[in-house]
Image (spheres, rainbow, N blue to C red):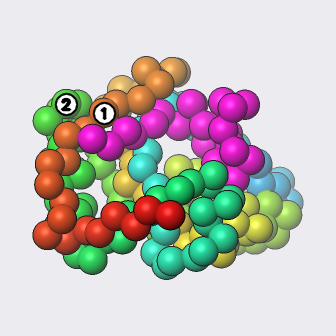
């Protein structure tokens, strides 16, 4: 079972500081241009493109999933989301690490992160409703089945 959180739920004060964030807003000012808030909540699931041992402490984690075949994993997670939430727009991509005081602007707030987190090398699955929704339910649970043919669980 995989829990996919709504972007609005990442503001929860009980989350570790490295996870807690306002995923619906990224303030960046370049001259007269201000890039700020999204009109709709969305669901996201984040992954790191590289193994970084400090992530265990940063994310208050005692395990990680090593994904040996990203294409198989991606197909599985997209299919599982579609099974419980049909008809949503799905996007996958790398986070854009941005200095909020300098150009260039990030094209998509859903993938914008402050450049102080660049070491995380984050990639995201993002699901957006076809019509804007101010606040979605806290999370969606996805049944992914057996992942052992292309993933390995590492527990401390």
- Work out whether residue 111 or residue 138 is closer to the camera in this orientation and state it: 138
Residue that carries the numbered disc 2 in the rendered image: 84
Give the residue drawn at x 66%, y 70%. 54
Whether the magenta-drawn stretch holds residue 11 is answered as yes
Give the residue drawn at x 19%, y 47%. 144
Q: Please indicate, yes or no, whether residue 108 appears anywhere in the rendered image.
A: no
Q: Quick one: label 2, few (<14), some, or many (20+) residues within 10 Å?
A: few
Number of the label disc, if any, that sits on residue 141 = 1
Residue 25 quadrant: top right
Boundaries of the magenta span: 1-25
Q: Look at the numbered disc 1 and give the secondary structure of its residue.
A: strand
Give the alpha-carbon distance from disc 1 to disc 2, as whole Å. 8 Å
Give the residue drawn at x 34%, y 64%. 153
- Work out whether residue 103 or residue 64 is closer to the camera in this orientation and state it: 64
Tell me the mark number nearer the camera, choosing from 1 and 2: 1
Q: Please indicate, yes or no, whether residue 110 appears anywhere in the rendered image.
A: yes
- Work out whether residue 29 or residue 113 is closer to the camera in this orientation and state it: 113
């Amino acid at each position: 079972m995989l829990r996919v959180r709504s972007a609005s739920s990442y503001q929860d004060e009980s989350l570790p500081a490295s996870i807690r964030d306002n995923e619906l807003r990224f303030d960046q000012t370049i001259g007269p241009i201000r890039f700020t808030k999204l009109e709709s909540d969305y669901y996201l699931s984040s992954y790191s493109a590289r193994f970084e041992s400090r992530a265990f402490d940063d994310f208050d984690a005692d395990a990680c999933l090593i994904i040996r075949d990203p294409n198989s994993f991606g197909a599985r997670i997209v299919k599982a989301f579609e099974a419980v939430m049909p008809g949503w727009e799905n996007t996958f991509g790398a986070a854009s690490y941005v200095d909020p005081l300098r150009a260039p602007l990030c094209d998509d707030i859903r993938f914008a992160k402050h450049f102080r987190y660049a070491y995380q090398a984050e990639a995201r699955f993002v699901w957006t409703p076809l019509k804007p929704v101010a606040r979605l339910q806290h999370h969606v649970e996805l049944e992914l089945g057996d992942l052992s043919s292309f993933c390995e669980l590492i527990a401390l």
